[in-house]
Amino acid sequence: MSVVSNDAVGPSADPVGSSADAVGPSAAPVDAMAPRPRGAVLAEHLPALRVIARALCRDRSKAEDLVQDTFERALRAIDQLDQQKNPRAWMVTILHNLHIDRCRHLARLEQHVPCDDVPLRAQDAADPPIWWTLTADDVARAIAELPGELRTTYCLFALEGQSYIAIAKRLGISKITVGTRILRARAHLKKLLIARLGEGAP
């Protein structure tokens, strides 16, 4: 009897090799579906954070500092980030918390200024600021004139003291949408109240 030669076996192994080559390209989509580096996920939301920070700080330099601190704190707490949820809302929450902390810190500093450091000057016999003429009814009427979605969100935040998270759950919207509506409501209120002051001017 003849023994099967290696030459006969060799060609039959080629399809196996070609099938292995075919498997290689199909594995590429698996790598493409791998989670992106979390630092890159955070960085892509920096433009939106800058817009919010500038609206809060009204100062470009302070806004940039706030965004930088937000990014650094997010990096330190990056293990808490779930990319399947909303990284932007998570970072906006960090930004708002930092901004509130800074405002409280500044308020404490203003309350503890030594008397010797406060310059004194003679009081001018000037008229009181025009804002003093506004009453609670004026503000209430201005709030009533806000568009529906802005009025509801603003009242829940400013009048009822609810958090962004609570408002988002109650209205079925994201936290960043809550923040956007509150900012828009404040800007709208300012225009309404300035207009009302103009109507009452002599």
Image (cartoon, rainbow, N blue to C red):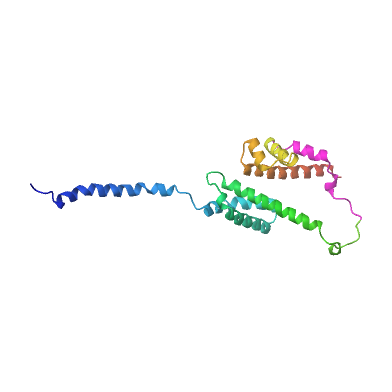
Query: Is 7 situated above or below 120?
Result: above
**Left or right: where 82 falls relative to 158:** left
Residue 128, x across and y down, in percent:
87, 50
Residue 152, x across and y down, in percent:
70, 36
Tally of numbered discs = 0
Magenta range is: 125-147
Residue 140, x across and y down, in percent:
79, 38
Q: Residue at x 59, y 55 (%)?
A: 76
Which quadrant of the view contains residue 60? bottom right
31 and 131: which one is in front?
31
Report if residue 143 lies within the magenta region: yes
185 and 24: which one is in front?
24
Check the picture and name the quadrant holding the C terminus: top right
- Outermost bottom residue: 116
Q: Residue at x 82, y 42 (%)?
A: 199
Report if residue 150 lies within the magenta region: no
Q: Residue at x 43, y 49 (%)?
A: 32
Residue 124, x across and y down, in percent:
90, 57
- Outermost front residue: 1
**Left or right: where 133 falls relative to 105:** right
Q: Residue at x 67, y 36 (%)?
A: 149
